[in-house]
Amino acid sequence: MMDKLEFILALAQERHFGRAADVCGVTQPTLSAGVKQLEGQMGVLLVNRGSRFQGFTPEGERVLDWARRIVGDTRTMRQEINALRHGLAGRLRIAAIPTALAMVAALTTPYRERHPNVQFTILSRTSIQVLDLLENLEIDAGITYVGNEPLGRVNAIPLYRERYRLLTAADAPLGNRGRVTWKEIAQVPLCLLTPDMQNRRIIDRLLQSAGGDARPTLESDSMILLFSHVRTGRWASVMPAKLAETLGLTDTIRAIPIVEPEAVQTIGLVVPSREPTTPLTAALVDEAKRLAPLLDEDTDTDRRGQRG
Amino acid sequence: MMDKLEFILALAQERHFGRAADVCGVTQPTLSAGVKQLEGQMGVLLVNRGSRFQGFTPEGERVLDWARRIVGDTRTMRQEINALRHGLAGRLRIAAIPTALAMVAALTTPYRERHPNVQFTILSRTSIQVLDLLENLEIDAGITYVGNEPLGRVNAIPLYRERYRLLTAADAPLGNRGRVTWKEIAQVPLCLLTPDMQNRRIIDRLLQSAGGDARPTLESDSMILLFSHVRTGRWASVMPAKLAETLGLTDTIRAIPIVEPEAVQTIGLVVPSREPTTPLTAALVDEAKRLAPLLDEDTDTDRRGQRG
DNA sequence: ATGAGGCGATAGGAATTTTCTATCGACCGG
DNA sequence: CCGGTCGATAGAAAATTCCTATCGCCTCAT
């Protein structure tokens, strides 16, 4: 029963019997039979098939919902019992949006000090993918934008506020400025994330509303690539203050506050809203709550510093 | 996995490997092996044994908690899918305290009209047993006292207020009265429920606080038995107004309001607080919410009538 | 003390279920 | 019309589950 539920979870994830079978570590006929058996037990067709996977029936969607819950609870139970015996141990799977990657260390480092037996898997994903992975039990927690769009069935713990900086060479146009406007930025050759990233969409919106043209010279899904271009002195980029600090400012590269408007996005930890969560996740939430005030303080200091 | 969880639920219920096996429809060695296998998967002993069942370990108690949740969710899923196909169908298991038994029909009758394919199992139990059965997934809903004692992890829907009447022959002492006090009642030979029933404990408390002696002449766990004694004209009893009405008042038997104090107990439907509940249970809650205002109205009318 | 009876664990074999390999038929795109 | 992909099916092998029979331990009554 339990494994059959895992089958349809994998099937929802892969939308392909063969690949879903791989994910589950069984052969395709086994998975096919498992799904069929589940359909027998339920007395309804769960999957629309026609020589291809064609999605789930309405009943299938409901079963899928329950399967997520039941499988999730089972994993949580396992982990809770294990934690009772051996303390916190296991692997914590986190996905973060690229602009937040740099601050994940601020969360994982104290976590690991408290719980040395926990291992981490950290993925870089778009904000949409983060929520998707969370929904499908493929990650334990996400770090993404909170407070703007509806987040679905998750709990959010705000971590810090993202403020934007123009990253550019000191000797480039605008390089000597104490602050710049979004309108001015639109004039320089920008390196930005690809449009599937929410960060890019936010920046596009800001540029457009300032009357500027949102046509970056270069786009990539890697912040490292963007930064390396800025380092040549020939390109500029827009990135969150925290990230700019982490990547390391040199004498030649400056991070200039962008005003009009001074845009602020809240970044936070998101975890499944199910109660109770796994011990590993619960500990991460604790860590986030501890960290949040510190980060906000940093941001305030930083802002005052830049302004003064 | 799933069936192993059912095993320990049965074990918690029966506190005996052999009987638990019977409940699950397997032999004792099968259940033993199942529990042992679960312990293997969890990596912890779940049950304390010493040639006898000696209760669960702390880890076992946690697993038990999760098992209730997971097994309950699985059943709910099954039922929900079934309801999508065939409408509401299946068996609704209800337990009610004896004094509330008579009003269950007010709930089941309209329910059955709306959902003709639903079957009922209705048990008469003490209020403690009702909550216990609910906790162990052995019933879907209970009807018992709400609003007094802590109820645990259940939701309560108030149904009506229980008011007490002295049931006695018209030609017996007090039989001609328009109202009586608790103190007066203590003087007549009473038939009451056994002390394991909360109703009896409530009445005892009222009698005692009125200075009367709480020593009933006859006690039983059956309301029918109590009533049949009253019908002889030689005994009296104290029962809720609703119940007295249902049992049928004749010219010779009167139901006399009891005052000083006029005691009121709220009776309600209790269902597991888990969300979402099974479709069968959800429909019962709907029915209860529909019924509650009608019942309260009756009670008020009744009270005014008795007083006037 | 000692024997009977109840309880849960264990052993070993039967039965069922699960899973695999191999292959088929349908559909899709060229 | 042909090659490739996808999911279903068939049949054999493997694994597991489950049962019967029995054991060892403990309790309680004689």
Image: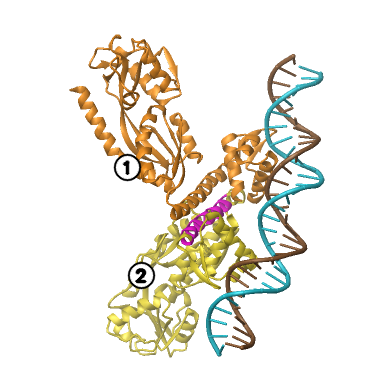
Chain colours: A yellow, B orange, C cyan, D brown
The span picked out in magenta is A60-80
Tell me the distance, in whole angstroms, between the alpha carbons under discs 2 and 1. Answer: 44 Å
Identify the residue at the far left of this view.
Answer: B308
- Output the chain of dot 2: A
Queried whether the magenta region covers residue A148, the answer comes back as no
Rendered position, D4 above or below B125: below
The kind of secondary structure element at disc 1 is: helix
Q: How many marks?
A: 2
Rendered position, A37 above or below B138: below
- Work out which quarter of the rendered image holds the N terminus of chain A and state it: bottom right
Tag of residue B79 = none
Tag of residue A265 = 2
Queried whether the magenta region covers residue A69, the answer comes back as yes
Magenta part, dominant SS: helix
Instruction: Look at discs 2 and 1 and give the one toward the viewer.
Output: 1
Among the 4 quarters of the image, the one containing residue A237: bottom left
Among the 4 quarters of the image, the one containing residue C18: bottom right
For the residues tagged 2 and 1, is the chain the same?
no
- Output the chain of dot 1: B
**Do we see residue A181 in this rendering?**
no
The image shows residue A105 at horizontal and vertical percentages of 50, 67
Camera-side residue: D20 or D16?
Answer: D20
Rendered position, A221 above or below B10: below
> Could you tell me the amino acid type at mark 1?
Lys
Q: Is residue C15 left or right of residue A45?
A: right
Q: Which residue does the numbered mark 1 point to in the structure image? A: B289
> Could you tell me the amino acid type at mark 2?
Gln
Q: Is residue A95 left or right of residue A216?
A: right
